[in-house]
Amino acid sequence: MEATKIIDSRGAACPGPITDLAKAYRNSKVGDVLELWATDKGVKADTQAWATKTGNEILEVKEDPDKIVVRIKINKR
Amino acid sequence: MGSKLSIILFSGTTDKIISAGVLSQAAAAMGSEVNIFVTFWGLLSFTKGEKKMVLPKEFENMGPALAQGMAKEHVKSWYEMIKEAKEMGAKVYACSMACGVMNIKKEDLDPIVDDMVGAATFLQQAEGGQTLFI
């Protein structure tokens, strides 16, 4: 599934990435795939917690050498 | 989403105010309702004017290292974090009794503060959610 939007939070410390995700979420619609790029190590657990809380779905978590990529499918608005 | 985080921000040292900032911003990003009730020493950082770093006596000499570490990790200031939280709906209240005791008037408060309220208002707002005393 192709990402609807890429959110580049590289370099931002916690809770920066999750805030960037929340902001993108506000402008998203059901069916969108948000792709979050981050370097903060907490982002894997935090995006999972966020998705559980907000009723959305983690499609993939990938660790690149320079970043962590999390793809989130928006199921609930 | 129904959940709620209420923080009683009592402490006046920057380390603890940073914790309150991080948790407020994170909770707001999670979609929670966030209320921060600033009282006693916390109020000293919520009046108008420059926000100085204040550390507890036993960690005072770590100030420069802390500032350096935060800059390296791009950690925002607690003020920026609370502003971010507010942008996502968080509210900041100043305790009316403590303001009276410390002779802080409504017009002395930083614009980040939404209102001056009493303990009953805060308790009523906090009911049914998580409450932290920092």
Image: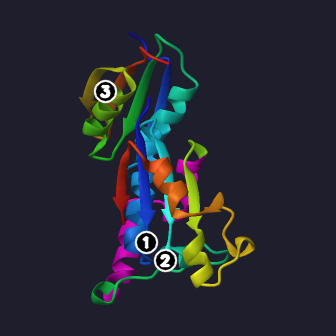
Q: Marks 2 and 1: CB-CB under 8 Å?
A: yes
Q: Chain of mark 3?
A: A
Could you say which disc has been placed on residue A52 in the image? 3
User: Label 2 marks which chain's residue?
Assistant: B
Q: Is residue B37 above or below residue A56?
A: below
Residue at 40% from the left image edge and 48% from the top image edge: A15
The answer to whether B133 appears left or right of B107 in the picture is left
The answer to whether A67 is drawn above or below residue B18 in the figure is above
For the residues marked 2 and 1, what is the alpha-carbon distance in whole angstroms? 6 Å
- Residue B47 rendering spot, x and y as whole percentages: 63, 75
Closest to the camera, between mark 1 and mark 3, is 1
- B81 inside magenta stretch: yes
Residue B36: image x %, image y %?
50, 57
Amino acid type at mark 3: Thr
CA neighbours of label 2 inside 10 A, class few (<14), some (14 to 19), many (20+): some
Q: Which mark is residue B40?
A: 2
Above or below residue B104? Residue A75 is: above
Q: Chain of mark 1?
A: B
Do dots 3 and 2 share one subunit?
no
Q: Are marks 3 and 2 in contact (CB under 8 Å)?
A: no
- Determine which residue is flagged by label 1: B10
Assess disc 1: are there few (<14), some (14-19) or many (≥20) residues with their C-alpha within 10 Å of its C-alpha: some
Q: Position of residue B101 (x, y in %)?
A: 57, 83
> Of the residues shown, which amino acid type is indicated by label 2?
Phe
Q: Is residue A65 above or below residue B21?
A: above
- Residue range in magenta is B60-86
Q: Is residue B81 visible?
A: no
Q: Amino acid at mark 1?
A: Phe
Residue B110 disc label: none
> Toward the viewer: B60 or B42?
B42
Closest to the observer: B96 or B55?
B96
